[in-house]
């Protein structure tokens, strides 16, 4: 079994575990989840399995359970099928978007502005968050596997607080995108947010808590944190940087539509048996088309456009028979999941 585990800052602390031992544990997890449905093969690279192991402190049993649950979620939720038309109504306020800049390590930056929340549907909000995560992963450079979140508390007030939304967000990000967060910068949070954070904190993994940084514009130590993370000439002025670049829905929509085309091409590359770059920066053999919805497959062939998906967190149980069959082939009888 070959691997290309990255020696980046994101997993430097994991090197205390000998490389050979890491490979052994990766092999144990791979054996435990086999056979892997063909449509999920791109999600089972050594690097991806390594992230699930790191999220569970290299406990093979816990990592296996976590990965199986995540693979089942992907079969049912179909995050790779979500495209701009599905989530445009969630995006137009600029509440979450991928910045045009990156941090000093080349990590994509997701800007979040809770005060710009424009819908009440938690399932719709989660769907848009998943779209943003998939998009950020699609745009990761080959030597990077993590991203940065910049949470701007501009104009934030008590009406913007939703424990339900926060719990759902934490669940999806921690269980299905482990080790994707490099650092989360909470920029200028109001005093009352500290009480809310105490309510949310128990839902966060210990590793995640350590990645959260409270930053205040009028604090010199905070300024140093931002200067260490970002090139200030590229950072938006809203965060103390020198760039006048901000959120423009028209420009952003065009960027996302172009990325949708890249995403669609990526999933359709399997038909030509070529070798394609995966979303986690590795090279894998392309597999057959991952469109497991015959209707979506037909639409793609007819007009080449990304067609809206009706899948949401609420109707995810109505997955296709093919998806259910694949999930049934995977053993999910492990003991109840325990947090590391």
Image (cartoon, grey):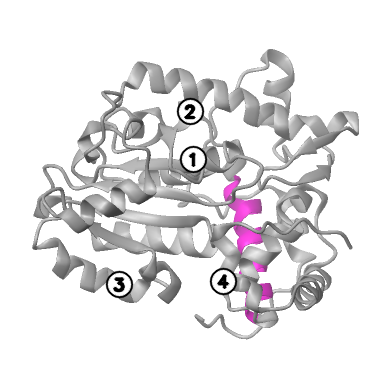
Disc with the residue nearer the chain's start (2 vs 1): 2
Residue at position x 68%, y 58% from top?
48
Disc with the residue nearer the chain's start (4 vs 1): 4
Residue at position x 26%, y 45% from top?
120
Percent of width and height locating residue 74: 62, 53
Distance, label 4 to label 1, CA atoms, is 30 Å
Residue hosting label 3 = 201
4 vs 1, front mark:
4
Q: In this view, does 161 lie to the left or right of 225?
A: left
Disc with the residue nearer the chain's start (2 vs 4): 4
Disc with the residue nearer the chain's start (2 vs 3): 2
Distance, label 4 to label 3, CA atoms, is 23 Å
**Residue 68 within the magenta-colored segment of the rendering:** yes
Q: Which mark is residue 84?
A: 2
Asked if the residues shown at circle 2 and circle 1 are in contact, with their CB atoms under 8 angstroms apart, the answer is yes
Residue hosting label 4 = 13
Q: Is residue 19 left or right of residue 199?
A: right
Distance, label 2 to label 4, CA atoms, is 37 Å
Percent of width and height locating residue 221: 21, 58
């Amino acid at each position: 079994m070959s691997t290309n585990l990255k020696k980046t800052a994101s997993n430097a602390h994991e090197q205390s575990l000998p490389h050979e031992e890491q490979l052994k544990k990766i092999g144990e997890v791979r054996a435990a989840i086999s056979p892997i449905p063909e449509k999920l093969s791109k999600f089972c690279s050594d690097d991806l399995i390594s992230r699930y192991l790191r999220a569970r402190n290299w406990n093979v049993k816990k990592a296996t359970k976590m990965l199986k649950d995540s693979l089942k979620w992907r079969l049912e939720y179909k995050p790779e099928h979500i495209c701009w038309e599905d989530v445009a109504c969630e995006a137009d306020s600029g509440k979450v978007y991928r910045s045009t800049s990156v941090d000093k390590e080349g990590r994509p930056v997701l800007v979040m502005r809770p005060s710009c929340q424009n819908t009440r549907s938690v399932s719709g909000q989660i769907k848009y968050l998943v779209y943003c995560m998939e998009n950020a992963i699609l745009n990761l450079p080959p030597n990077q596997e993590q991203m940065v979140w910049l949470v701007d508390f501009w104009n934030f007030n008590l009406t913007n607080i939703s424990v339900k939304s926060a719990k759902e967000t934490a669940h999806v990000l921690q269980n299905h995108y482990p080790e994707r967060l490099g650092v989360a910068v909470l920029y200028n949070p109001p005093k009352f947010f500290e009480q809310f954070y105490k309510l949310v904190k128990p839902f966060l993994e210990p590793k995640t808590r350590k990645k959260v940084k409270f930053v205040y514009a009028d604090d010199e130590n905070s300024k140093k944190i931002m200067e260490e993370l970002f090139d200030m000439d590229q950072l938006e002025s809203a965060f103390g940087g020198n760039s006048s670049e901000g959120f423009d829905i028209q420009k952003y929509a065009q960027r996302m539509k172009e990325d949708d085309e890249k995403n669609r091409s990526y999933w359709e590359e399997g038909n030509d048996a070529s070798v394609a770059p995966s979303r986690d920066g590795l090279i894998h053999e392309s597999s057959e088309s991952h469109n497991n919805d015959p209707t979506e497959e037909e639409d793609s062939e007819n007009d080449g456009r990304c067609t809206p998906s009706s899948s949401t967190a609420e109707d995810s149980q109505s997955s296709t028979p093919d998806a259910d069959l694949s999930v049934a082939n995977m053993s999910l009888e492990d003991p109840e999941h325990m947090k590391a």
